[in-house]
Image (spheres, coloured by chain):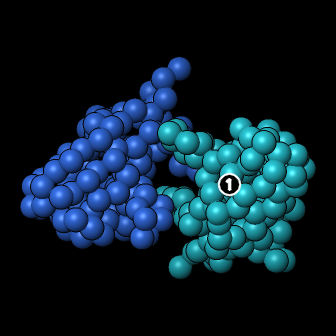
Amino acid sequence: GAGVSQSPSNKVTEKGKDVELRCDPISGHTALYWYRQSLGQGLEFLIYFQGNSAPDKSGLPSDRFSAERTGGSVSTLTIQRTQQEDSAVYLCASSSTTGETQYFGPGTRLLVL
Amino acid sequence: GDSVTQMEGPVTLSEEAFLTINCTYTATGYPSLFWYVQYPGEGLQLLLKATKADDKGSNKGFEATYRKETTSFHLEKGSVQVSDSAVYFCALSDYQGAQKLVFGQGTRLTINP
């Protein structure tokens, strides 16, 4: 079956602009995670959604970052007023429920000029 | 907080050599431990996992044993192939809450024919 998909695969933006990154989890997976992979910080957790529960936002680096998950499926990560340090690969993962194996998407490579 | 420390790379070996990539962790509670692999141009894939002390995870000839006494989860393979060239990430997840993954910094492995 289809895996986790993310779009766009690459995004180049100018400093100060807003960007939206999309994640389509595996159908039926209730848990969804966003991670960031950058040269300086490695792979780090950003935010977690489980069903209709309030998300765990403890990994978001600043209030410029937000995410939502509509209808318990697709998720959008929004970065407002982008900065050069936001340049990274943003990874989405889903699992059938919390605690089960996380399956990763191919990522969105973001470059902020 | 929880953390994972991996052997620094890059690691270069000849085909059929023995591989060890060291991984140690710091965590409260009883984490699950994972090795993820990222092949060139591809997304993160789960290689193997262990959920409790003394468990051994194995896949594709790779093995790792959950050692609680030494807080380690070293990755081993008896005879590597060129196709094993990739970046390997050790990770843990707690058994509570979001069970998000905490990753090591990754080890780039190159196998020469």
Tell me if I can see residue A80 in this picture.
Answer: no
B60 above or below A44? above
Residue type at mark 1: give it. Leu
Q: A16 and B16: which one is in front?
A: B16
Q: Is residue A99 left or right of residue A104?
A: right
Number of dots carrying numbers? 1
The residue tagged 1 is B109
Which chain's colour is blue? A
Q: Is residue A91 left or right of residue B100?
A: left
Chain of the residue under label 1:
B
- Give the residue furthest to the top: A1
Image quadrant where one finds the C terminus of chain A? bottom left
- Give the residue furthest to the front: B113
Image spot of residue B23 (x, y percent): 72, 68
Question: Which residue is depicted at the point 32% across and 65% down?
Answer: A60
A89 above or below B97? above
